[in-house]
Amino acid sequence: PQEEEQAEAPEEEPAAIEEEPIVEEEAPVVEETTYEEEEDTSEVAAYEYESEEASATVEDEDEDDSETRAAYVPPKSGSSGPTIIIAILVTIIVALLVWYFMFYRPGQKKVEEEVQKTEQMEKDAEAKKLADAQKAKADSLAKIEAARIAEEEAKAKEASFITISEATRRYYVVIESFVDEDMAADLGKKLAADGTSTALLSPKDGKKKLYRLVLQDSFGSWREGQDEADKLKPEMGDDLWVLRY
């Protein structure tokens, strides 16, 4: 009997299980409708919440835009780049002009003045050197001339005119021959006054009466007399010749 009861028990359980699904099938319909309504209500509430947030966000954005518009300054029409470049170029040009006329040009002018001063000093030194050389040359020429004059004066003081009447057997350089003794004496004295000592050789007895005006120096040979004559010809003329008296 117990085994039968145990065997019958499982048959009763399926009936209960079959009845429950029927109840469960009806109940879910109400529950689903209620869920959908709640879901719709929640969706509406969420939509309203989102709308409020959106409106608040829009209001915040409007406020931010108004603040941005109040703080933002629109750029001026046109680009300011060329104006800035022109201003920089003008500033550079002005600075260069100031530097040139205030610093470079005065310094350059000072350098030029120093160069001109140095060149002028060199020219003055060269001119002084040339003047000193010319003065030294003039002084030297003056000394030479003074010596020559002094020598001529000394010769003039020492020069003399004499007459030789006796034969000396020596050789004389003849300057000129005269028939007139006085003419010969006048020329002899004149040459003596100029510094040349002369002598008048009187004519020998029985000879042609010619007065010979000769140099006062005499020589022991004809050759010596001729050498002296050749040396004096450029100064006293080519008519000089040698005579033994």
Image (cartoon, grey):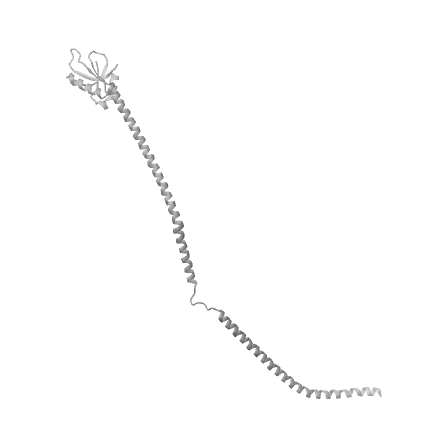
What residue is at 32 percent from the left and 34 percent from the top?
131
Q: Specify the quadrant that holds the N terminus.
A: bottom right
How many numbered circles does the render carry?
A: 0
What residue is at 36 percent from the left and 42 percent from the top?
117
Q: Position of residue 85 (x, y in %)?
A: 42, 60
Query: Against 20, is 103 above or below?
Result: above
Q: Position of residue 183 (x, y in %)?
A: 16, 18
Q: Position of residue 19 (x, y in %)?
A: 73, 88
Q: Quadrant of residue 180?
A: top left
Q: On the picture, is 5 further left or further right than 227?
A: right
Q: Position of residue 196 (x, y in %)?
A: 23, 20
Q: Specify the quadrant that holds the C terminus.
A: top left
Outermost right residue: 1
Q: Nearer the viewer, residue 227 or 141?
A: 141
Q: On the picture, is 203 further left or further right than 106?
A: left
What residue is at 28 percent from the left and 25 percent from the top?
146
Q: On the picture, is 67 further left or further right than 45?
A: left
Q: Quadrant of residue 215?
A: top left
Q: Nearer the viewer, residue 237 or 104?
A: 104
What residue is at 31 percent from the left and 32 percent from the top?
135
Q: Nearer the viewer, residue 104 or 231?
A: 104
